[in-house]
Image: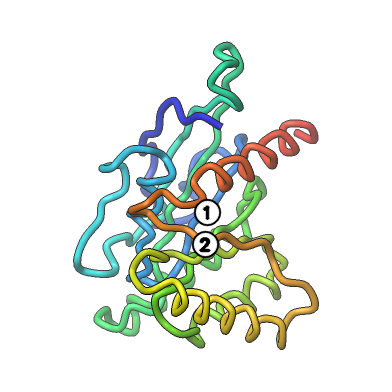
Amino acid sequence: MEIISARLVSCSADVRTCPKPHLPEYAFVGRSNVGKSSFINMLTGQHRLAKTSATPGKTQTINHYIIESRPDPLQRLRRGSWYLVDLPGYGYARQSQQQRKNWQQLIQSYLQQRKNLVYTFLLIDSSIPPQTIDLDFADQLGQWQIPFVLVFTKTDKEKQNLVHKHVQAFLKEMEMRWEHLPPYFLASAKKKTRRKEILEFIQEWNTRFQAIA
């Protein structure tokens, strides 16, 4: 897949004000300091698309980006559009309990109500050991029957043997809770690791969405 353009089209504080659900949609969610904005910018090839900040918790609304792409750079006439959705981060302790509760309700409402949501990408920080809050969120996605993919971020931040240890520990914890593991990628925003594979994954599901639409 080649990304032609990407732009922000909506910032919604209520799922009812999100764009019309007529295009395939992919949501990105994770803990507030998982590097979500950097990952989105890397994936779309636009360094300033999603705002990055040293202070976690920057995303406070459901942010829809419309992406125009084509399956192959050589197929100039074949273009398609889809939504990339940046959801608020969870688990940010510096916000008030009420604010965190509001964000949790917003995320839940979105995930359960968006009929065009194809996959949710759950971002996990590979530079640290498995966190209960991430495992619990994955379990919640399962209970809601939301298809999701794991993306282990920051794979360039630590030595590879430590990254491997953290990833395997997380997957082992999931194996104790799940009969089958979801798909997963090991990614780095800095090195653009697995960008091609993730975009190919999205393209495959775009094609399936179009076939049944």
Q: Does the residue at mark 1 contact the one at mark 2 (Cβ under 8 Å)? A: no
The picture quadrant where one finds residue 184 is bottom right
Q: Who's the residue at 52% across and 54% down the image?
A: 27
- Disc 1 marks a residue whose amino acid type is Ala
Q: In the displayed structure, would residue 189 be above or below residue 79?
A: below
Colouring mode (rainbow / by chain / secondary structure / one colour):
rainbow
Q: Earlier in the sequence, mark 1 or mark 2?
A: 1
Q: Who's the residue at 55% across and 59% down the image?
A: 121
Could you say where residue 192 lies in the image, as x and y percent from the top left? 41, 48
Q: Classify 10 Å Cα crowding around label 1: few (below 14), some (14-19), many (20 and above).
A: many
The picture quadrant where one finds residue 140 is bottom right
Q: Nearer the viewer, residue 183 or 28?
A: 183
Could you say where residue 180 lies in the image, as x and y percent from the top left? 78, 72
Does dot 2 land on a helix, a strand or a loop? strand
Q: Who's the residue at 61% across and 43% down the image?
A: 202
Could you say where residue 191 lies in the image, as x and y percent from the top left? 37, 51
- Disc 2 marks a residue whose amino acid type is Leu
Q: Nearer the viewer, residue 174 or 29?
A: 174
Label 2 belongs to which residue? 186
Could you say where residue 203 lies in the image, as x and y percent from the top left? 63, 37
